[in-house]
Amino acid sequence: MLKSLRFSLSGIRFLAIVALLLGIFFRFINLDQKVYWGDEAYSSLRIAGYTTEEVVEATYTGEEIGIEELQKYQRPNTERGLVDTLKVLASEDSIHPPLYYIKARFWEQLFGSSVAVKRRLPALISLFAFPCLYWLCLELFNSSLTAWIAVALVAVSPIHLLYAQEVREYSLWTVSVLLASASLLYALRVQTKRSWIIYALTLALSLYSHLFSGMVAIAQGIYVLIRERFQWSQRLKSYILAATSGLLLFSPWLFIFLNNKRQAYEQWEWTTESLSPLSFYQSWVANLIHAFLDVQVASQDPFSLVFSYDSPITYLMLLIFLLVAYAIYFLFRQAPKSVWLFVLILMAATTLPLVLLDLKSGGQRSTIARYHLPSYLGIQLAVAYLLSTKLSNIAPSRWQFMFWRLITIILISCGIISCSLVAQSDTWWTKYSDYYNVRVAKIINQSPAPLLWSDSNYNRILSMSYALDSKVRLQLVNSPEETTEFSQSKSYLQLLQTLPNPFFKNKKEVQDLSQKKLLETSKNFSDVFLLEITPPTSLLRSELQKSKNYKFELAYEEKISFKDRKTLLWRLAK
């Protein structure tokens, strides 16, 4: 029996290694295929060292520009240096600490600024999560089997894959949280000066990766206090000294953030908008399931979680939900207090404060999956502990062992299937408002010589530009507030004065123009499109209909439930 058990456990380790290799493969395949969405475009702007105002003033003029001119602000160049990157982050985007953006700038200067190259950096950083996670499991559980299962679960976790392929700091944040957590447990165990210095440095690294690491640091402090039973001890003294040192290392950026906190509140203001109770709790369930399963079937809306009695996906989601609940219960009942307390605090570190804020004052902070990456790690640690304990226990019957081996295989298989679907797709729910960019761009790109008009937000247009062919020309204008008179909007007036008129209503209009002008216009543009991504409400189409008597035909329309975003593409009628 013991020999059979060892053979079976070797099989589980082999499965974990296969999952790890597949997870690495999935992270680097088709990196340039998916939508380069608005937040990624925003990151590129910061990496290149340009402010929002500079981009809008240069491109939203009503004058005709090309894709290359628009994307000039999306890549490092000789006009701007690293100092400009830091200045822009400090003045406009202090909610994002600079570590990832500094790394990304050097990366792009060395290797280029194509979408595949941009995304290769976060994918590469995400690989460091595996040794950090393995180390954390050894410190926490002292079990290589638990470590291998945890690595396998994270390697093929769809949520970790999605954010490992995004030009944002989330893969770096995941790595830094794991590293700081393992360093803390190591320092508590060996209690050497060197170990506490390592913890101080990894804590600073984590804080420079993401501001929400502050919540993780507070949770770690609570863990040490409870572990030391609120009594002054050498461990507590060393922890306070190390944590203070890490905070002092982060203090320059903390000062910048506090100096710009009003701006930070404005940038986070959208998360305070309330959702309907159904959407709110549905998002919680979806976020939990996405740690292990994400297949996006049976619904056009990527944010709609569909339950159906005749769908196998429904039963898989129910199985995962029950498994996670049982894993947390099992961890609490079977693991030592120092173990279950650490895992539960890691789960609660970012999630609990956001949930309490939403329940108290309304909002959707707790529904944003990327804010809960530390919590995902905690959940996956709990599940890995459950599976490894059940599989390595020789007391139960062979049938019980077979049952838990089957559960392990199903869970890892769910991740592999999810990751394979993610890898082949050109969009996913993490693209939010830009989810339908590829479909819209395909319509525009089919035109021999298209012109695109829009007054949508600049990050939406920058995102769309990555899906458009180089032949597409654009004319962009700032949309005034709904209360502003059009006559007071310089951008709109400029557009109306300079817009080409490729289509004419009658012969008299044609006769009023020179033959040369008519030929130039007909040669330049075969189709004119107008793009609206709402909210905010687009005002350009209604004003063109009123002032120029243009008529538009709807070429594409789709909606997602996230913030009731709607994407509309209009074609100017001939």
Image (spheres, rainbow, N blue to C red):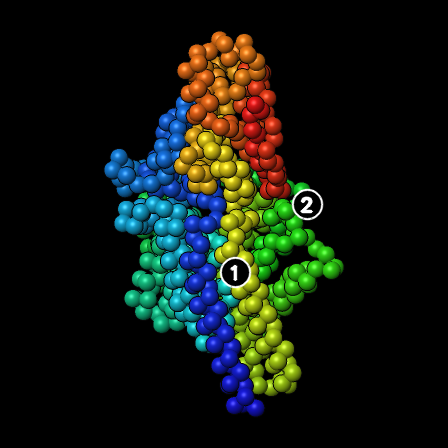
Amino acid at pointer 2: Pro
Residue 9 in the image: above or below residue 351:
below
Q: Nearer the viewer, residue 3 or 520?
A: 520
Q: Residue at x 61, y 42 (%)?
A: 560
Q: Residue furthest right?
A: 309
Amino acid at pointer 1: Ser
Position of residue 364 measured from the top left corner of the image (x, y, whole percent): 58, 44
Relative to residue 314, is residue 73 drawn left or right? left
Q: Nearer the viewer, residue 311 or 562?
A: 311
Asked if residue 540 can be seen in this view, the reply is yes
- Snapshot quadrant of residue 91: top left
Q: Residue at x 42, y 20 (%)?
A: 520
Q: Label 1 near label 2: C-beta < 8 Å?
A: no
Q: Nearer the viewer, residue 208 or 70?
A: 70
Question: Crowdedness of circle 2 by 10 Å Cα count: few (<14), some, many (20+)?
Answer: few
Relative to residue 148, is residue 303 drawn left or right? right
- Which quadrant holds the N terminus? bottom right
Residue 41 in the image: above or below residue 6:
above
Q: Secondary structure at mark 1?
A: helix
Q: Residue at x 55, y 48 (%)?
A: 429
Badge 2 or badge 1: first in the primary sequence: 2
> Mark on residue 420?
1
Find disc 2 in the rendering and name its residue. 277
Query: How many tags in the picture?
Result: 2
Q: Nearer the viewer, mark 2 or mark 1?
A: 1
